[in-house]
Amino acid sequence: MAGSTFGERFKITTFGESHGVAVGVIVDGVTPGMEIDEAYIQVQMDRRKPGQSSVTTPRKEYDTIRILSGVFEGKTTGAPLSIQLQNTDMRPEAYSDIKLLYRPGHADFTYDQKYGHRDYRGSGRASGRETAGRVAGGAVARKSLEGRGVSIVAYTTQVGDIKCETFDESIIEKNPVRACDPDAAVRMVEKIEALAAIGDSCGGIVECRIRGVAPGIGEPTFDKLDAELAKAMLSIGAVKGIEFGEGFAAASMQGSEHNDAMDKNGFLTNHAGGIVGGISTGEEIIFRVAVKPTSSISSPQRTINKEGEEREIRTEGRHDPCICPRIVPVVEAMACLVLEDHYKRQAALHG
């Protein structure tokens, strides 16, 4: 399937389907001699795996990884690094009643139009389960970036109409929605659970902060760092929008307000979000992504079948009522992949 490979000098190819035998990733362009093991990657996999709380899908996948190639005696060899995760809790029969129906908001209709044949078991490649391979590959990139002094953290700032009012990084991994505001987190959980109880779902906003990126990272003109990050984020199935720095608020600002003035010590503000002209400034890179409500809901909806006949559909099964908590590590992983790729491009530029 075209479109399953991402990156230029540091690249990944993900494989597998939601209810198939396994999912995974092949990572190419890994720097040889880097110390890495399954335990390091597993930390990120455990953050993304299903069944973590009452606000995520109850599907039980332990997402235990197995490195098949590219690592010897605890160090990368420079050969392609292959990582596999066995699917263990598949229930393809849960989709037999809707295999001829198109779920509103899902890729059922569009995949059928493109390929003429689709895997209806949990959407196959269009499932959020595909992101497991991204997180595994992103963990490899993260390990390299740590050696460069780069750190990446994402978190939920909004669920439905509930917004975070404070920022406390220390509590992000201590609440089920991965919010940066403990009080808002409680209300977010209540909202998600209430919607799940009536067969509905909600979306939200996830913010990401990247620190320690050297100035000068990014490529003009079509491979700008923010353009590459935008492509990476919009490739995540549930993401429908992205903004950097002040984002859309910049439309109502004046140039004298939005421009980041400088003095001998550096930038005085960071309205641009750490990227100017598509190249990093050395300031903190900040962006936000809009996450749509989960498409699979049990409330009745109007649709059509493969013959174009009108039908009513209810999507029963195991689905996240809000995808924000589990998309946080995916956002981080994709950011890691983009940055490691661009660091390697910069190294090639300067020999």
Image (cartoon, rainbow, N blue to C red):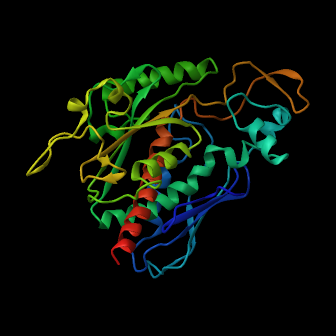
Asked whether 243 or 257 is in front, the reply is 257
Q: Residue at x 40, y 80 (%)?
A: 33
Q: Residue at x 33, y 59 (%)?
A: 217
Answer whether residue 85 is visible to the viewer in this image. Answer: no
Q: Quadrant of residue 101?
A: top right
**Number of marks present in the image shown:** 0
Q: Residue lying furthest left in this view?
A: 264
* Residue 218, above or below 172: below
**Is residue 140 found left or right of 293 in the rendered image?**
left
The percent coordinates of residue 92 (x first, y second) are 78, 44
Answer whether residue 116 is visible to the viewer in this image. Answer: yes
The percent coordinates of residue 304 (x first, y second) are 83, 25
**Is residue 303 found left or right of 43 in the rendered image?**
right
Asked whether 146 or 1 is in front, the reply is 1
Q: Residue at x 48, y 20 (%)?
A: 191
Asked whether 216 or 311 is in front, the reply is 216
Q: Residue at x 48, y 69 (%)?
A: 9
The percent coordinates of residue 185 (x first, y second) are 38, 28
In the picture, which quadrant includes the N terminus?
Answer: bottom right
The percent coordinates of residue 165 (x first, y second) are 29, 24
* Residue 6, above or below 153: below
